[in-house]
Image (cartoon, rainbow, N blue to C red):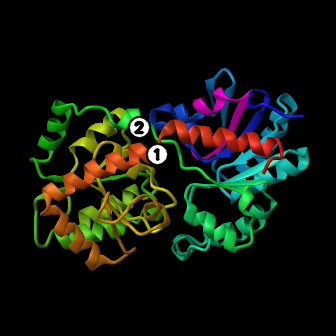
């Protein structure tokens, strides 16, 4: 018997603490509210540090925080049992193939329901990711066991799918679906007063922008090394880091020790509305991650006609055509990155032209409506054994 999505209930396991704390949520709440619209029920168990324990996102969607400690996995397992007793779910959806995947696979086996796992990060056979933390070795062990238990796998770009296919996973189980990005939110007309106010704050110097979590994978200390080198020859730019994360204090220490206080500014989190003004005020977006599976900020910035200089991680490589709608440099190549950035800072018209091309390409290729439709179609096929 065919099951419609409107009769389908899904339990997600996530690390998106923005689902609990609306102040720093960006568009994550709106995205999950939109997912819930097509379903009978969507509940989300959230691992991570947050003072908020529950958040009702809509009539049929609620997020539950379980904390970030050794006992959180057990807390989540108990809570899952209570939720299954209340709402019989058809699918358990894990937002990563590690701890979330471990919990989701156990629940799927216990309750005999479908199990989907996501690769929002480039974790598979990634030497840079393995070097980031000792715990990633454990996660690597887990993912090699968990993905083969999954009924379905969602990845955010085709290059991750290619790696999974080489490992022996079946093509019909893997869908390439990028994270939906709100093109309306980030392609609005320029508010010249807000843009001018931001530029005036930094004496009209060229603004180099980073947007994202302040975590190891974003390779921000390498970015600051590039800035430190570039400062030896020019002083016509500033670097703004927008976002929060565990590396914030260490980044502030680096800035102070290397006398970059008049060049590098950590601005914290911004709302999508605020972020649009920074995209419009900036000269160039920088994303030098050594582990980047997609790069949603590349798309957001491109909608606002801001091009990106990115490292050749899987995500940026799948989005950017070098020198056409952005620029790519080799991961951790300090001299090449410094020289490319130095060149681009001297080419205002070129940068603006590539920004317009990024907007044109991304509006064509990354429609939010199309991404939601792909998610919904994939869920429909999973619960109806059509993969």
Mark 1 lies on residue: 366
Q: Give left or right: position of 150 versus 59.
A: right
Q: Give left or right: position of 369 versus 288.
A: right
As displayed, is residue 377 above or below residue 97?
Answer: above
What SS does tag 1 mark? loop
Is residue 46 on the magenta stretch?
Answer: yes
**Residue plotted at (71% across, 73% down):** 167
Q: Are marks 2 and 1 in contact (CB under 8 Å)?
A: yes
Q: Is residue 351 visible?
A: yes
Residue extending farthest top: 59
Mark 2 lies on residue: 183
As displayed, is residue 315 above or below residue 376?
Answer: below
Counting from the top left corner in percent of width and height, residue 94 is at 70, 49
Mark 1: few/some/many CA within 10 Å (<14, 14-19, 20+)? many
- Which picture quadrant has residue 102? bottom right
Precedes in sequence: disc 2 or disc 1: 2
Q: Give left or right: position of 339 versus 65.
A: left
Is residue 219 on the magenta stretch?
Answer: no
């Amino acid at each position: 018997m065919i099951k419609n999505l409107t009769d389908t209930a899904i339990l997600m396991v996530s690390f998106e603490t923005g689902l609990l704390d609306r102040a720093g949520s960006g568009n994550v709440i709106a995205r999950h509210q939109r997912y819930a619209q097509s379903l009978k029920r969507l509940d989300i168990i959230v691992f991570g540090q947050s003072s908020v324990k529950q958040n009702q996102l809509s009539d049929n969607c609620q997020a539950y925080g379980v904390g970030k400690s050794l006992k959180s996995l057990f807390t989540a397992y108990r809570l899952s049992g209570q939720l299954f007793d209340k709402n019989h779910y058809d699918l358990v959806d894990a937002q990563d193939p590690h701890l979330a995947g471990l919990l989701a696979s156990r629940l799927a086996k216990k309750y005999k329901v479908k199990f989907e796992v996501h690769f929002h990060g480039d974790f598979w056979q990634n030497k840079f990711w393995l070097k980031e933390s000792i715990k990633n070795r454990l996660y690597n062990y887990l993912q090699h066991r968990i993905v083969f238990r999954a009924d379905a796998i969602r990845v955010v770009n085709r290059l991750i799918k290619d790696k999974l296919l080489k490992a022996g996973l079946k093509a019909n189980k893997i869908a390439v679906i990028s994270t939906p990005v709100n093109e309306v939110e980030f392609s609005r007309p320029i508010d010249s007063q807000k843009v001018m106010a931001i530029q005036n704050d930094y004496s009209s110097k060229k603004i180099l922008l980073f947007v994202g979590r302040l975590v190891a994978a974003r390779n921000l200390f390498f970015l600051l090394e590039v800035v430190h080198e570039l400062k030896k020859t020019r002083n016509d730019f500033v670097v703004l880091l927008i976002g929060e994360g565990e590396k914030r204090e260490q980044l502030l220490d680096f800035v102070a020790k290397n006398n970059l206080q008049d060049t590098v500014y950590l601005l914290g989190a911004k709302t999508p509305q605020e972020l649009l003004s920074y995209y419009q005020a900036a000269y160039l977006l920088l994303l030098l991650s050594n582990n980047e599976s997609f790069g949603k900020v590349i798309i957001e910035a491109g909608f606002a006609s801001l091009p990106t200089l990115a490292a050749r991680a899987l995500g940026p490589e799948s989005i950017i055509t070098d020198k056409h709608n952005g620029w790519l440099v080799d991961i951790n190549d300090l001299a090449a990155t410094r020289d490319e950035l130095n060149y681009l800072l001297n080419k205002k018209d070129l940068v603006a032209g590539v920004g317009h091309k990024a907007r044109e390409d991304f509006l064509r290729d990354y429609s939010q409506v199309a991404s939601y439709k792909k998610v919904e179609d994939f869920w429909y096929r999973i619960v109806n054994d059509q993969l």
